[in-house]
Amino acid sequence: MSTAPDPTYRGRFAPSPTGPLHAGSLVAALASWLDARAHGGTWIVRIEDVDTPRCQPGADGFILRQLATCGLVSDGPVVWQSRRGPLYQAALDRLITAGAAYPCACSRKDINTALHAAGIGRERHHLAVYPGTCRPERGGLHGRAARAWRFQVGPGTLHWTDRRLGPQAQDVATEVGDFVLRRADGLWAYQLAVVVDDADQGITQIVRGEDLCDNTPRQRLLQQALGLPVPGYLHTPLVMGGNGEKLSKQNGAQALDLAAPLCALNQAAQHLGLPAATGSLPDALAQWVSAWPWRDLAPV
Ligand code: GLU
């Protein structure tokens, strides 16, 4: 199957260096690379190391070597989010000026107490929807010291179309609430960093694991508020661990055995519904590029 090359296509793989790549992250890496190649575009790697306490020293270099062993090499310089604080600050300043971000004094305990007082229970493992205590129209900080910065989410359902999963909808205000842009510990939140970087790096298509699908509406709201272009999205199937949960570094996923990269890549490819490939590594990658099923860059 062929697709006219799209030289404007720019994709990326954006691993968090919290540990080595595992079978699940290789699926996202391979899919993002194949989608870029199938469209004749560019593919870059970005190290998402803003959440410094969760990062593992040396994992960034290890991941880059794992990718290279699999024949997946960034077409441009690799960037590290931890070096890009001024860009995130500039974006936050723009949101503050536009009245789209506000300071918040609430600790997790304050939030739980407020939710409890309002009779709102919450299921374990579910993120609390911020009750809006520090919203400007509710009197702001009430004399307390600011801890974090939040994005002020407007009402309404956000609709969008994923290239694999089809139409999606989320009411961000009621399902997520005013989300954090800069954390109480001073670290930049993933949502802000990812949106700023995708725009700064000219990313036109985002291909990543399905676990991130429900982050997309938050990111689209930020793109709108910052006047940034909206990329297309394709979320890839997750690899499940033996416990039925998504395979992750946190639940003990094994680092890939890259003594035989083609074997690990074949497993990832199979997970994407691609045929088994033989021959050399470049041959296998070329076979999967030809067989790549998600050719349409659906309108967003
Ligand atoms: N850094 C994120 C992760 O490793 C991926 C973010 C993204 O692709 O938007 O899960």
Image (cartoon, rainbow, N blue to C red):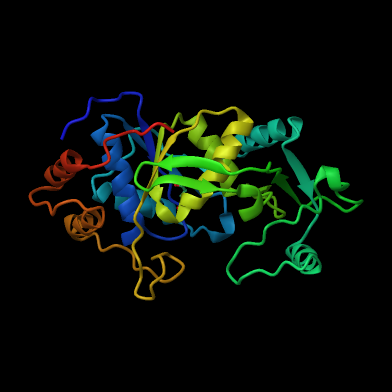
Residue 296 % position (x, y): 30, 34
Residue 144 % position (x, y): 88, 53
Res. 263 image quadrant? bottom left
Taking 50 as reference, is 250 left or right? Answer: left
Taking 256 as reference, is 133 left or right? Answer: right
| Quadrant in the picture for the N terminus | top left
Identify the residue at horizontal 47%, vertical 59% (top origin): 18
Figure disc tally: 0
Identify the residue at horizontal 59%, vertical 65% (top origin): 126
Taking 297 as reference, is 287 left or right? Answer: left
Taking 114 as reference, is 8 left or right? Answer: left
| One can see residue 22 in this view | no
Establish if 137 lies above or below 95. Answer: below
Q: Compare residues 257 and 102 and report the one nearer the observer.
A: 102
Q: Compare residues 65 and 28 and report the one nearer the observer.
A: 28
| One can see residue 287 in this view | yes
Residue 69 % position (x, y): 25, 50
Identify the residue at horizontal 60%, vertical 72% (top origin): 124
| Quadrant in the picture for the C terminus | top left
Residue closest to the far right: 143
Residue closest to the far bottom: 243
Establish if 112 lies above or below 134. Answer: below
Q: Compare residues 58 and 132 and report the one nearer the observer.
A: 132
Res. 93 image quadrant? top right
